[in-house]
Amino acid sequence: MKKLFWLASLAIVTLVCTSMAFDINDPAATSGNTTYSNTDVFGTILGTIPSVNPGPSNAWVGMAYANGFIYQFKNIASPTSTALVQVNPSTGAVVNTYTLAFSGYVIGAQYDGSGIWVVQWSPTNMIHKVSLTGTAITSFAPGVAPYSARSLGYDGTNLLVGCNQSSNVTELAKYTLGGAMVGTPISSGTAVGWYMDAEVCADAPAGGNYYIVDNVGNTLKRLNVGATVTVAQSIAAPAGSPDVAEGLAYNGDDLWHCGAYASAGLLWRIDDGYVSTPPVLSITLAAVGSTVVPNTGGVINFNVSLLNSGPATPYAVWCRVKNPDGTYTAPTLGPVTINTPVGVTITRNRNQTVPAGWAPGMYYLIGYANTSFAYPAIDADSFSFTKSVADGNGPMVFEATCYGELFPGEVAVSAPASYAVANAFPNPFNPSTTIHFNLPEASKVTLNVYDMNGRLVSTLVNGLREAGTHQATFDGSNLSSGVYMYTLNAGQNVITGKMALVK
């Protein structure tokens, strides 16, 4: 009990910015804006990022794109298992790795806006839905024997599942998200050698927007899906021999592709062959200056640009922060209702404070534009920032506030006042020291001192104090040498500091 209390007393927290019950798998969360390409050549390599080698006898298999990240499945030979790996699409760096709850191997994957569907082909043929951290959500048996379900696509309503019996006997089955087959499977004949992974691309015309990886000949194919399945386009996959073309993901504009063994050490971003149509509302966030704040808190400066391409006016804009654990804060900016003329871009310079109580790690500041305050938004953009483990030289920050140049219709929010606690002086001390603290407003205050075992040593303040600078003296005449902690509770803030008694 004392240990738990001591850990709690060390926490520097804020209650101003709390977690909301929004869907943490928000599909628009970190989608980012795209410079819309004026090329429409299927297979054009738009860029590459490094790919981590899966390791001996392991293989990268299905891919999906969600919340601004690439998700790859890795089949692990020993012990037989599958890992879900979150990858930064800007750098190729692995962000997180999760182990799936079920054993065996998987193959094709597809994100549906709330989770990733993935096909398990060994030891049993099943279709699973997992969260972005690999937690099991639901599953069903496809029931296509003697065919084997392999690839997955999602058209916004149903799952499109590629099935194989042999390299020339294939079909495409459609299922509801509840696992019920819709109609009867559609023959693919010899159009597809082996379904490996698939995506439905919104840019391509309906009926011709099903893209697959076919590892017979290592090809990427765009299929026409009608009474039968035919090939509209076919190109050689970049992950060709000596590798095996395997994974495919769609980020809303382009395709991402991987090889099973990362022989080239790359992931490829590939043009899907169609030009994306810019949204009627668009938002762009750009960090200005440093994106690293110290453990004691700080400020991130950034620009927000909004374009109304019409006719959606008025519209809502807001920002929130995605935490390292995948949860979100409440909106720190807005929602603000804006009514600007069509074709007008407005840009504002803003400041986002990062409280001392937030854990070290990588965060994302996300901006949204939509016809109303609702998810998913018409457009979203984001940038990352890092909370360091190192302390800074400035005052401690205790509120998450977004302030700066106002948008039309926005109510001004002042830069947050800081409950600044000066270092106890003198420190080290013998036998007494003075603790100074500031209150920006009248508050109920308690100031306690604890030893390193979490035992209460002394209560220096307990009562209402007016706004302003205050001090309290701590006398250690009757105490042993050692480190002591002081904890100030003022309003919604808990602040701690250390001081050393040396005799």
Image (cartoon, rainbow, N blue to C red):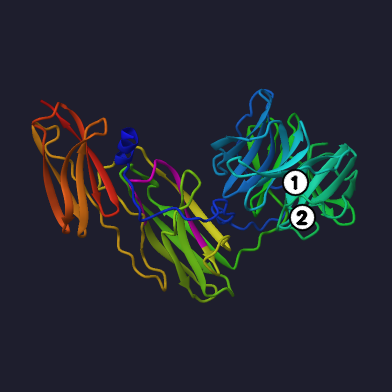
Region rendered in magenta:
352-368
Residue 164: name its quadrant.
top right
Q: Which residue is tagged 1?
A: 152
- 341 over 329 or under it: above or below: below
- 491 over 3 or under it: above or below: below
Residue 138: name its quadrant.
top right
Q: Which residue is tagged 2?
A: 209
Mark 2–mark 1 Cα distance, whole angstroms, equals 13 Å
The answer to whether residue 28 is left or right of residue 481 is: right
The answer to whether residue 19 is left or right of residue 313 is: left
- 274 over 144 or under it: above or below: below
- The residue under the point 78% across, 60% down is 206
Q: Position of residue 294 (x, y in %)?
A: 33, 43
Q: Position of residue 392 (x, y in %)?
A: 28, 42
The residue most toward the front is 1
Amino acid type at mark 1: Leu
Amino acid type at mark 2: Asn
Whether residue 390 is visible, yes or no, is no
- Report the mark closest to the observer, 2 or 1: 1
- 151 over 338 or under it: above or below: above
Considering the whole magenta stretch, tell me its main secondary structure: strand
State the residue in front, 445 or 340.
445
- The residue under the point 73% across, 47% down is 43
| Residue 354 shown in magenta | yes
- The residue under the point 28% across, 51% down is 493
Q: Residues within 10 Å of mark 1 (few under 14, many from 20)?
A: many
Which quarter of the rendering shows the C terminus?
top left
Q: Position of residue 2 (x, y in %)?
A: 31, 34
- Label 1 element class: strand
Which quarter of the rendering shows the N terminus?
top left
State the residue in front, 49 or 16.
16
